[in-house]
Image (cartoon, rainbow, N blue to C red):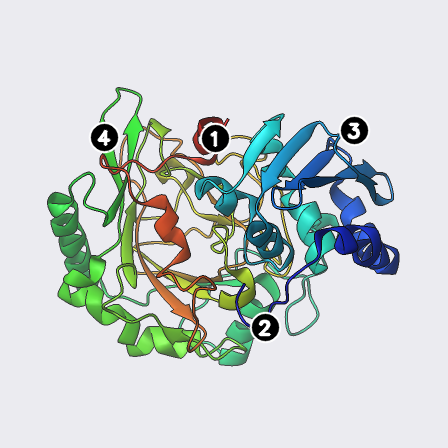
Amino acid sequence: MQAGFPGIDFHDYHRRLLPELLAGGRAALAAADTAALQPLSLRVRERDAAYTYLPRPDGIEIASGDARAETIVALDQESFEGLVHDLESPASLIYRGRATPLRGDLMHFVRWEPVLRAIFAGRPIYDAAKLDLRDRRGAPLDPLQGFRRGDDPLELAHFLREAGYLWVRGVFAPDEVLTLRSEAEALRRAAVPGDQKSWWGRNARGEAVLCRVLAASAQPLLRSLPSDARLRELVALSDHALVPRDRDELDAVTVLWKNPGMREGLSDLPWHRDCGMGGHAVMCPTLVCSVFLEANRPAAGALRFLPGSWQSSYRFEEGGGAAPDLGAAPPAEPGDLTLHYGDVWHVAPPPTGEEGPFRCCALVGFERPGMRHHRGERHYNDVLLGREDGQVANMREMARARE
């Protein structure tokens, strides 16, 4: 375990510490999302012991053993500690092959994530009905409010702080957008399935389709984005000191394309946070800048945000499934950009239209100075790479593969 994160005695944690935390208020946090849950048991292999989390209307009851569990998940000690310290997530453990289902469905483990974060880390569960987001004058915040660079920076900073994201219009001129599109197309032509520098999926015809290129800094204008004064100016609105990722890192600048009719892969992303593959406790807050090269419309596969969600958790939902109209989709045009904290819950549902252009964005990441992976690896999302055909399995595919 990384320095600064203590080891955890599995039995003492469940018999003494966790009950104390639940009694101290974390049961009430968990109660916001227990209604649809079934009992979950976590078993640590090294101790050959298990404890079951029983959902109750007023929170969680802890029971020894796994006889009452609908789903039993086996973890090693390090993975359990990472889950408690918010260094790992159910998704990260499934993708890394560190979570084994002994009974039930691993997707139940994923569905438990908001409640586990509530009881382990004290993180609230998102509830739009309880939010009261306000602008600087005290009026209700308009979640689709757009800004321009010349607007009052205090207004922009306040919106970013409240909503967790920010939409800024007209940052890049039309000729810059054309150049960025040209560079993106050059990257698209050069990408090869299995090159470990791109994400691929499959459409309804079974064809391999490029979803994202990671090494976009190979192109000159894309490479310049992390140091672009306009982006730096907007990132400086954050209450946190954040710096761009090293431009020579594989995913310092990436380009994504939405595609219609996708059936496999990570083209259509469910509601997620950018630290969903682990590392929240060491990497957050982060900021992601999305430079729009095509419009952000439902027909094009619009990016949507949950306003005010960046300091809470939300349940797993498929990108094109439940509540597709939840949240806010800024109607950004080419040349606009959005900033969002990595903890903001956001979704990338499939395009509702069949003819393009579909959404295309250049993404630039900003992080805390000196941020390091808690296991000493390069990046948490690297777990998504590795297949020779370049395909990136979605969450349900990975859960089935671990059965």
Rendering coords of residue 262 (x, y %): 34, 29
Residue at image mark 4: 208
Q: Is tag 1's residue or tag 2's residue first in the polypeptide sequence?
A: 2
Helix, strand or loop at disc 2? loop
Q: Earlier in the sequence, mark 3 or mark 2?
A: 2
Amino acid type shown at disc 3: Arg
Query: What is the C-alpha distance between the residues marked 2 and 4?
Result: 43 Å
Q: Position of residue 218 (x, y in %)?
A: 15, 61
Disc 4 residue type (three-letter):
Ala
Callouts 4 and 3 close, C-beta under 8 Å: no
Cα distance between the residues tagged 1 and 2: 31 Å
How many neighbours does mark 3 have within 10 angstroms: few (below 14), some (14-19), or many (20 or more)? some
* Residue 403: percent from left, percent from top: 50, 26
Lower position in the chain sequence, tag 1 or tag 4: 4
Query: What label does residue 68 carry, if any?
Result: 3
Residue at point 41%, 55% (across, down): 380
